[in-house]
Image (cartoon, rainbow, N blue to C red):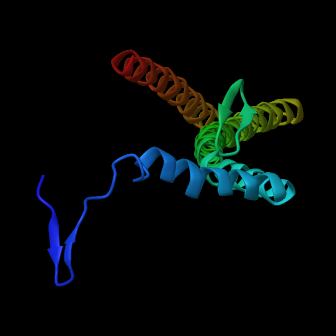
C-alpha cells in the first residue's frame, strides 16, 4: 500500500481494526441512544403511537351503518335515500293518477244517474198527464199524438244512450287489447 505524504513527512495508514464499521456506528451512535430515549420517555412514546393510530383510523376508515341488510357509507346512504324518495314519488304519482281516474268515473256515473232520473221523471210526467187527461174526459187526438211524440222522443233518446254506452265499452275493450 501506498502511504500518504504530507509536508511533515510520511504518515502511516491507520490500522483497519481501529476504524469503526457501519454496524458499530449504527449500534453505538443511533440504536443505543434511541433505546435509552424510548425507555426514558415511555409515556410520551405510547401517547404518540396511540395518536398516530387514531389519526390513521379517523382518516382512513369510513363510518358505516346497516340499512336493508347492507353495510353502507354516508354517500351510499344518501344515494339510497334519493332512490327511495324517487320510488315513493313515482308510486304517489301513480296513485294520484288512479284517484283522478276514479274521480272522473264517479263524476261521469253521477251525471249518468242524474240523466236517467230525469228521463224517469219525464216518463212519469207524461204518463201522469195522460192519466189526468183521460180521467177528466179531455182526451183528444191532438193531445194524444203530442204525448206519443213526446214519449217517442224520450224513448229514442234512451235508445241512443244505450247504444253510446255499448259502443264506448267496445272501444275501451279494443284499446285495452291493443295495449296489452
Tell me residue 62's x, y (percent): 64, 46
Which of these two is toward me, 100 or 8?
A: 8
Up-down: is 9 above or below 63? below
Q: Quadrant of residue 146?
A: top right
Outermost residue toward the front in this view = 9
Q: Quadrant of residue 161?
A: top right
Q: Looking at the image, which residue is at 25% across and 62% down?
A: 12
Tell me residue 164's x, y (percent): 48, 28
Q: Looking at the image, which residue is at 58% across and 52% down?
A: 28
Which of these two is toward me, 41 or 80?
A: 41
Which of these two is toward me, 161 or 142?
A: 161
Q: Looking at the image, which residue is at 63% across and 37% down?
A: 91
Tell me residue 173's x, y (percent): 44, 17
Answer with left or right where residue 11 lies relative to residue 143: left
Q: Looking at the image, which residue is at 11% across and 58% down?
A: 2
Which of these two is toward me, 150 or 62?
A: 62
Amino acid at each position: 500500500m501506498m502511504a500518504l505524504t504530507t509536508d511533515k513527512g510520511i504518515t502511516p495508514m491507520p490500522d483497519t481494526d481501529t476504524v469503526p464499521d457501519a454496524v458499530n456506528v449504527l449500534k453505538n451512535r443511533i440504536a443505543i441512544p434511541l433505546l435509552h430515549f424510548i425507555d426514558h420517555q415511555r409515556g410520551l412514546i405510547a401517547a404518540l403511537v396511540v395518536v398516530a393510530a387514531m389519526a390513521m383510523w379517523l382518516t382512513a376508515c369510513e363510518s358505516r351503518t346497516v340499512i336493508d341488510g347492507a353495510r353502507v357509507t354516508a354517500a351510499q346512504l344518501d344515494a339510497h335515500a334519493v332512490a327511495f324518495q324517487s320510488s315513493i314519488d313515482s308510486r304517489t304519482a301513480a296513485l294520484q293518477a288512479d284517484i283522478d281516474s276514479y274521480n272522473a268515473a264517479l263524476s261521469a256515473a253521477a251525471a249518468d244517474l242524474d240523466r236517467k232520473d230525469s228521463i224517469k221523471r219525464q216518463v212519469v210526467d207524461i204518463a201522469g198527464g195522460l192519466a189526468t187527461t183521460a180521467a177528466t174526459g179531455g182526451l183528444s187526438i191532438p193531445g194524444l199524438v203530442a204525448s206519443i211524440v213526446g214519449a217517442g222522443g224520450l224513448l229514442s233518446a234512451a235508445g241512443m244512450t244505450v247504444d253510446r254506452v255499448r259502443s264506448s265499452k267496445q272501444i275501451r275493450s279494443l284499446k285495452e287489447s291493443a295495449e296489452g
